[in-house]
Image (cartoon, rainbow, N blue to C red):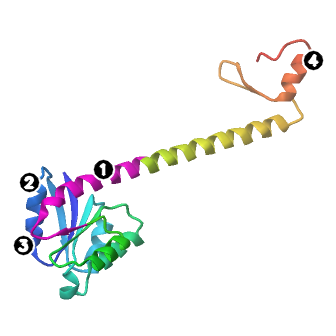
């Protein structure tokens, strides 16, 4: 299964894209939009696995691929974006790639579509896992820092302090208590 957002004024072209995805083994669920408001509403409604936008849509609906890419960038979404066109020059491709397109695919020649989609979906998964691992590390470091601050605070108390569990076993003792036990010859094995 794959959830795709299609920015395309031609229902026929959207159908061809969906057939290509099915031919590649995907079972697409999709929404087709033709306006900036449509893009925004679709992005609010659910998460998407990929976005396909028609470069020529700008001439028909005052919506272009750059606007779609800007909507994705403004929302800070990690969403593979593909521009579909039958009339792109190198300058336009460069501008689209700088704006956040992951690839530009020529309509009528979808031989690169499936490999590009597979690649970008794998890359998006890796980026997600990397962010999740980074957050787990930051959380772990925050816990260690909190434990360090807690331990430092407990040890700074001049009175003897200890915490016991429900079986009356000491689970935490501050340095003052450990020092007193040592001075009394009771040892520090608490």
Report if the CB atoms under discs 4 and 3 are less than 8 Å apart: no
Q: Vertically, is 130 above or below 29?
A: above
Residue 16 lies, in percent from the top left, at 8, 66
Residue 112 among magenta residues:
yes
Residue 176 lies, in percent from the top left, at 87, 28
Q: How many marks?
A: 4
Marked residue nearer the N-terminal end (4 or 3):
3
Q: Which of marks 4 and 3 is in front?
A: 3
Residue in the image at 18% along x and 60% along y: 113
Q: Quadrant of residue 142?
A: top right
Marked residue nearer the N-terminal end (4 or 1):
1
Front residue of 147/111: it is 111
- The residue to which callout 3 is attached is 12
Q: Give the range drawn in magenta.
A: 104-129
Marked residue nearer the N-terminal end (2 or 1):
2
Q: Could you say which disc has been placed on residue 183 in the image?
A: 4
Mark-to-mark CA distance, 4 and 2: 79 Å
Q: Which of marks 1 and 3 is in front?
A: 1
Q: Residues within 10 Å of mark 3 (few under 14, many from 20)?
A: few
Q: Residue furthest front?
A: 90
Marked residue nearer the N-terminal end (1 or 3):
3
Q: Nearer the viewer, mark 4 or mark 1?
A: 1
- The residue to which callout 2 is attached is 23
Residue in the image at 6% along x and 73% along y: 12
- The residue to which callout 1 is attached is 122
Residue in the image at 37% along x and 48% along y: 126
Report if the CB atoms under discs 2 and 3 are less than 8 Å apart: no
């Amino acid at each position: 299964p794959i959830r795709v957002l299609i920015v395309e004024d031609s229902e026929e072209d959207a159908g061809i894209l969906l057939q290509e995805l099915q031919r590649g083994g995907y079972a697409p669920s999709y929404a087709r939009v033709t306006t900036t408001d449509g893009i925004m509403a679709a992005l609010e409604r659910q998460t998407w696995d990929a976005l396909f936008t028609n470069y020529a849509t700008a001439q028909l609906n005052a919506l272009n691929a750059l606007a779609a890419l800007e909507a994705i960038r403004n929302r800070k979404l990690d969403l593979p974006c593909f521009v579909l066109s039958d009339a792109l020059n190198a300058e336009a491709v460069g501008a689209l790639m700088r704006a956040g397109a992951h690839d530009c695919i020529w309509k009528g020649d979808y031989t690169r579509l499936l490999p590009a989609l597979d690649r970008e979906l794998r890359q998006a998964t890796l980026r997600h896992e990397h962010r999740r691992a980074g957050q787990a590390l930051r959380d772990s470091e925050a816990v260690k820092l909190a434990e360090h601050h807690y331990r430092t605070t407990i040890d700074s108390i001049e009175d003897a302090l200890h915490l016991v569990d429900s079986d009356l076993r000491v689970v935490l003792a501050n340095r003052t208590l450990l020092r007193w036990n040592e001075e009394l010859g009771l040892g520090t094995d608490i």
